């Protein structure tokens, strides 16, 4: 990709002047970014794969090499070779530009020999003081793996993509240099598992990031950089958190809690809500409230849809409306409106309304009551004139079940007359 803009030409020029990786940087990467192994044979002979030293008598899962002092992970095996790989970054300044240099470290282990390391530079992220970025990197080949680089290609200008950003989120060499504006905006110390290029760009373009970083809340900042939409939503509330010096124990839970507060119409500028004494308890409390609100909204939507079906219901069931009969104690009457179906289902906790029984053309639904208290809901077939089901509270049968079914069956003649009318 050829340089076209003034900034790209500046990057290309600086790209040629970067110094090679130092031995100290490569040694740090070997010590801190890959696993270190010791192979143990059945006889108990243990070999450090870092330096090749051998000794006997180690029984723990981890140990230190008596010769080089490396902390090793023990494996019981007869293997003689192993490989390891990692990515690490070196942060530096070149020609007034901030640059993140990403290296791939390949380590080859062989019993009895010192480990062999090879570090290849694969990506460079360039950032100027205005937060403008550019990428110089090796060419990627077609393939399933993210790190399918063409190592014979040159570090040239490339279009940024998800694969480069994913790989650049890696270990960072602790001794780094930064441009004056980044130092002024608070960049110092570790990157706290935040992708370096994302943090540096955000720090140069968003003063909210500067505020959070200078307050020492790097864990909170990591969440906001990984979820920028959360920062936009939460910022007014988060300023209250900073002023109150409130410590958020779980950022994901806190953000979800704020969204539920907003759903419930609470004031997100009120410290009483924003800084709860027990975050998890309040989260669970408002989760239940949101569930109730959603159920109410769902019911309203169902009722709205049901009212649109009222005319269809009256066309199907109009000749039966007002029908009722009794044995002196139990009164059985036809449900005479769509709303009545939903009220019946809500009272007895079953689905006669939600499942739209009012639109079934070949059944008739009754409410069986004693002294106007709902007891069971009865569905009768208009084809066989038999009771299909009779359900009480939570779909259970009541002590009056058989009596209700018998009462309905005795009055089938009244239903037949209504149909013939």
Image (cartoon, grey):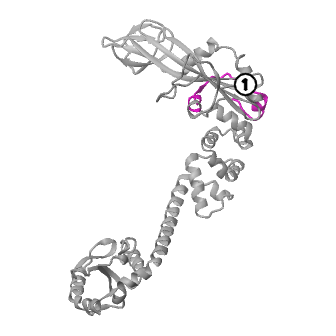
Start-end of magenta stretch: 165-188
Q: Above or below — where is 180 with respect to 220?
A: above
| Res 371 visible | no
> Does residue 300 appear to the left or right of 393 in the view shown?
right
Residue 300 percent across, percent down from the top left: 50, 72
Name the image quarter holding residue 286. Answer: bottom right
Question: 94 or 157, which lies in front?
Answer: 157
* Residue lying at 31% horizontally and 72% vertically, measured from the top left: 395
Question: 178 or 218, which lies in front?
Answer: 178
Q: Check if residue 173 falls in the magenta segment.
A: yes
* Residue lying at 75% horizontally and 32% vertically, measured from the top left: 182
Residue 244 percent across, percent down from the top left: 70, 50
Name the image quarter holding residue 390. Answer: bottom left
Residue identified by numbered label 1: 11
Residue 81 percent across, percent down from the top left: 40, 12
Q: Check if residue 155 falls in the magenta segment.
A: no
> Does residue 152 appear to the left or right of 127 in the view shown?
left
Q: Above or below — where is 111 with respect to 132?
A: above
Question: 311 or 307, which lies in front?
Answer: 311
Please tell me how crowded label 1 is: few (under 14), some (14-19), or many (20+) other residues with Cα within 10 Å: many
| Quadrant location of the C terminus in the rendered image | bottom left
């Amino acid at each position: 990709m050829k340089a076209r803009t003034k900034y790209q030409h500046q990057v290309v020029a600086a790209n040629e002047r970067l110094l090679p990786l130092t031995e100290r940087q490569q040694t740090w990467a070997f010590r801190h970014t890959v696993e270190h192994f010791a192979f143990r044979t059945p006889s108990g002979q243990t070999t450090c794969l870092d330096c090749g030293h051998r000794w006997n008598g180690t029984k723990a899962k981890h140990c230190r090499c008596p010769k080089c002092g490396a902390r090793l992970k023990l494996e019981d095996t007869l293997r003689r070779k192993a490989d390891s790989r990692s990515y690490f970054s070196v942060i530096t300044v070149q020609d007034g530009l901030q640059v993140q240099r990403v290296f791939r470290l390949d380590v080859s282990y062989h019993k009895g020999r010192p480990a062999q390391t090879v570090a290849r530079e694969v990506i460079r992220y360039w950032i100027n003081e205005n937060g403008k970025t550019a990428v110089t990197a090796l060419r990627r080949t077609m393939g399933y793996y993210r790190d399918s680089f063409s190592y014979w290609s040159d570090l040239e200008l490339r279009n940024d993509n998800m694969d480069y950003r994913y790989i650049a989120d890696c270990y960072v060499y602790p001794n780094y240099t930064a441009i004056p504006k980044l130092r002024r905006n608070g960049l110092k110390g570790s990157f706290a598992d935040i992708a370096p290029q994302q943090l540096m760009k955000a720090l140069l373009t968003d003063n909210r990031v500067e505020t959070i970083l200078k307050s020492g809340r790097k864990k909170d900042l990591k969440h906001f950089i990984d979820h920028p939409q959360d920062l936009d939503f939460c910022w007014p509330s988060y300023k209250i958190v900073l002023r109150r010096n409130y410590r958020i124990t779980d950022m994901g839970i806190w953000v979800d809690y704020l969204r539920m507060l907003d759903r419930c119409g609470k004031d997100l500028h009120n410290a009483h809500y924003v800084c709860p004494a027990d975050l998890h308890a309040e989260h669970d409390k408002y989760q239940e409230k949101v569930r109730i609100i959603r159920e109410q909204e769902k019911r309203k939507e169902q009722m709205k849809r049901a009212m649109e079906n009222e005319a269809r219901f009256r066309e199907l069931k109009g000749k039966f409306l007002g029908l009722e009969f009794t044995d002196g104690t139990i009164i059985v009457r036809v449900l005479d409106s769509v709303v009545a179906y939903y009220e019946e289902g809500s009272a007895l906790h079953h689905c006669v309304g939600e499942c739209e029984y009012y639109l079934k053309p070949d059944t008739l639904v009754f409410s069986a009551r004693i002294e106007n208290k709902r007891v069971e809901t009865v569905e009768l077939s208009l084809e066989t004139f038999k009771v299909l089901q009779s359900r009480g509270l939570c779909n259970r049968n009541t002590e009056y079940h058989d009596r209700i079914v018998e009462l309905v069956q005795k009055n089938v003649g009244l239903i037949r007359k209504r149909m013939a009318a």
